[in-house]
Image (tube, grey):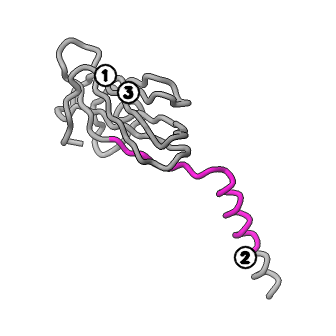
Amino acid sequence: MNDANRITGLDTYEFTGLAPGPYRVYTYAVRPQGSVVEARISVPGSTSRNPQIVTGPMPGNRFVYLQTHAIHDVVTPDGNLTVVAEHPGGVPNAYLNGIQIVVVPEPATFVSLAGGAFLVWLSRRRRR
């Protein structure tokens, strides 16, 4: 978290070539020097609220929602995803530390895995 890119106003990060589907986007935005500075993070098309304001400072070795990072859930039908970072003040003191994009499995995947685990459990029980 001590390595960061200064948000100079309205910075846009575009990601292409993702598989269509649901994603959870974690955007880390903490000033390395440890003071409170607002960074507004938006993900267009997100089902989560936009923008989310990350304030800092970094609380030791922990991550705290809206203090160290924002979380957005988004479904991308075309594999394109955009993250917008904005510093609302006059002097650019906000920072972007990183963006993590995580695939969210669809509910059908969970049902299939649970059903398979149940069948394995049932077959082991019948052998006894």
- What amino acid type is highlighted by mark number 2? Val
Magenta region includes residue 75: no
Q: Residue at x 41, y 47 (%)?
A: 17
Residue at horizontal 38%, vertical 32%? 83
Provide the residue span drawn in magenta. 99-119
Magenta stretch: dominant SS?
helix
Residue type at numbered disc 3: Ile
Q: Nearer the viewer, mark 2 or mark 3?
A: 3
Q: Is residue 93 shown left or right of residue 77?
A: left
Question: Which of these two is toward me, 26 or 31?
Answer: 26
Most extreme residue toward the bottom is 128
Q: Which corner quadrant of the image does residue 120 belong to?
A: bottom right
Q: Residues within 10 Å of mark 2 (few under 14, many from 20)?
A: few
The CA distance from mark 3 to mark 1 is: 6 Å
Query: To which residue does mark 3 refer?
Result: 41
Q: Which of the 4 image quadrants contains residue 87? A: top left
Image quadrant where one finds the C terminus? bottom right
Q: How many discs appear?
A: 3
Query: Label 2, on which residue?
Result: 120
Q: What's the mark number on residue 86?
A: 1
Task: Identify the mark at residue 29; answer none if there is no mark.
Answer: none
